[in-house]
Image (tube, rainbow, N blue to C red):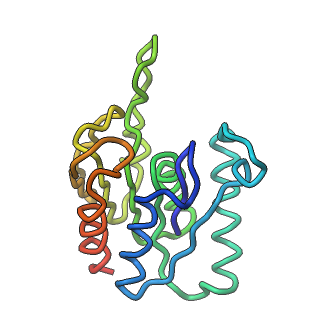
């Protein structure tokens, strides 16, 4: 399952590259659009609402179409954060983070790091991050691989590298 970023939908190029990589590995893919986007709003709902909506979709799919399948969750930016926060509760066996927003840039006051959301994940995790991402570069961790690709937070500069990193990581499942 893949979720979108705060300002875009599931049609973002890096999500499409990740989806295509998963399909090439023979995996089923569900792209999840959050309710605030479906309602036409631009601003994301609070984290608890995002997590609840995400978990409800997972519960529904696991009760039907995806029954008995292993679950890999992920997304780009905000979607990656939701996937990390809900990974344990949803029974995910892996987490894919595209452009994880480690620290929000350009704030008058320094914002706290979101590294604890990544560190709370205890299953294999791949972070694909643009080398010039203004949101920062997460460090590798015990079960976390961080792959640097050319570009910034959009990950549009080298979609082939994004796809190759995702495909190689998915091959372990």
In the rendered image, the vertical position of residue 132 relative to residue 28, given as above or below? above
In the rendered image, the vertical position of residue 128 relative to residue 167, given as above or below? above
Q: Where is residue 57 in the image (x, y as percent from the top left)?
A: 68, 68
Q: Position of residue 118 (x, y in %)?
A: 38, 48
Which residue appears at 63% of the width and 79% of the height? Answer: 62
In the rendered image, the vertical position of residue 5 relative to residue 32, given as above or below? above
Left or right: 29, with 32 as reference point: left
Q: Which residue ends up furthest to the right in the rendered image?
A: 39
Quarter-wise, where is residue 33 in the image? bottom right
Q: Where is residue 153 in the image (x, y as percent from the top left)?
A: 36, 42
Which residue appears at 28% of the width and 80% of the height? Answer: 171
Tell me the quarter of the image containing the C terminus: bottom left
Which residue appears at 31% of the width and 41% of the height? Answer: 152
Q: Which residue ends up furthest to the top in the rendered image?
A: 108
Quarter-wise, where is residue 41 in the image? top right
User: Observer-nearest residue: 138 or 20?
Assistant: 20
Quarter-wise, where is residue 96 in the image? bottom left
Q: Which residue ends up furthest to the front in the rendered image?
A: 157
Q: Where is residue 106 in the image (x, y as percent from the top left)?
A: 41, 19
Left or right: 164, with 77 as reference point: left
User: Observer-nearest residue: 56 or 9?
Assistant: 9
Left or right: 43, with 21 as reference point: right
Tally of numbered discs:
0
């Amino acid at each position: 399952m893949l979720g979108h970023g705060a300002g875009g939908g599931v049609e973002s190029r890096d999500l499409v590259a990740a989806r295509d990589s998963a399909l090439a590995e023979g995996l089923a893919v569900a792209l999840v659009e959050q309710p605030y986007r479906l309602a036409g709003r631009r601003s994301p709902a609070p984290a608890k609402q995002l997590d609840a909506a995400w978990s409800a979709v997972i519960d529904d799919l696991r009760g039907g179409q995806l029954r008995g399948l292993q679950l890999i969750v992920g997304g780009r930016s905000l979607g990656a954060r939701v996937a990390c926060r809900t990974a344990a509760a949803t029974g995910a066996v892996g987490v894919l983070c595209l452009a994880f927003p480690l620290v929000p840039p350009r704030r008058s006051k320094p914002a706290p790091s979101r590294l604890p959301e990544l560190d709370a994940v205890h299953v294999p995790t791949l972070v694909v991050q643009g080398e010039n991402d203004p949101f920062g570069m997460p460090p590798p961790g015990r079960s976390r691989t961080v792959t640097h690709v050319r570009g910034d937070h959009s990950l549009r500069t080298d979609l082939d590298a994004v796809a190759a990193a995702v495909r190689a990581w998915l091959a372990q499942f």
